[in-house]
Amino acid sequence: MDAPEIIRISQFPVLSTTREWLAQHLLGIIARGEKQALFFANTNFIVKNRFVLAPELVRRCVIVNDGIGMDIAAKLIQGRRFASNLNGTDFTPFLFRQSPQPLRVFMLGAQADVLAKAVRYVREVLGQEVVGSCDGHAGIRNAHDLVQQINATRAQVVLVAMGNPIQERWILEHQDALSANVLVGVGALFDFWSGGKRRAPAFVQRIHMEWFYRLLQEPRRLLRRYTWDILVFLRACFKYR
């Protein structure tokens, strides 16, 4: 398995690797009892998450590329493309499938009804041991109690679905206090697992137009992300090239 390399996108050290390498890396983290945060960086991540670049924070996480915008930036600025496209929606189930036994998973985020359906999906379809869950609204108000709740479950993996930059801030603020090995920011993943949102058809994903499919579904929420924020992203890429 080829060793990964770092491609810098607007100062962010983004790992260029395959899903196979990344899955084995994270499973090794779990086996050794270590800790790692995993972030999927799309163009919106680069715009909203500059705080992650603080030296004491960036070394505590692995950042991988998510989406065609990151690949285009890598080609334009660094002259090479990423090894593969890695997004939480596809990679998280792949990670579960690579584990020789079910992982102990805690799920944090989304509305209570969405979360309940997503938990059932992870248990019944993906075959993992969901040891606890908490919604992303009332459930997160007392951070100390929530950390204790998660630690009491002996979770190995914590999936945090709050959208960026909220999920990244929460992970980095609580990573030291949590005993879980792998903390992952997964965005809208629980909405897909619950059936509340639909993935783009396979052919749309293959031509890298899933972003446009999502824009058509949620124009009010996503219009700025795919217009103005793209310009901010490109400016940041060239500024720090």
Image (cartoon, rainbow, N blue to C red):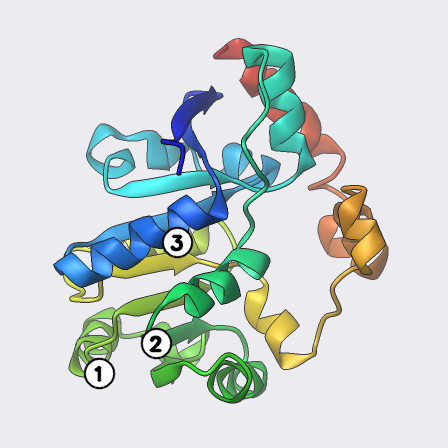
> To which residue does mark 2 refer?
106
Q: Position of residue 83 (x, y in %)?
A: 54, 32
* Disc 2 and disc 1 in contact, CB within 8 angstroms: yes
Mark 2 packing: few (<14 Cα in 10 Å), some, or many (20+)? many
Q: Which mark is residue 23?
A: 3
Instruction: Tell me the SS state at disc 3.
Output: helix
Residue found at x 74% / y 64%: 199
Asked if residue 108 is positioned above or below residue 172 in the image, the reply reads below
Amino acid beneath label 1? Thr
Looking at the image, residue 59 sits to the left or right of residue 138; the answer is left
Indicate the quadrant where residue 78 lies. Answer: top right
Type of amino acid at the residue the image marks with label 2: Phe
Q: Which mark is residue 153?
A: 1
Q: Is residue 5 above or below residue 24?
A: above
Residue located at (82% from left, 60% from top): 201
Counting residues from the start of the chain, the first of labels 2 and 1 encountered is 2
Q: Which mark is residue 172?
A: none
Disc with the residue nearer the chain's start (2 vs 3): 3
What SS does tag 1 mark? Answer: loop
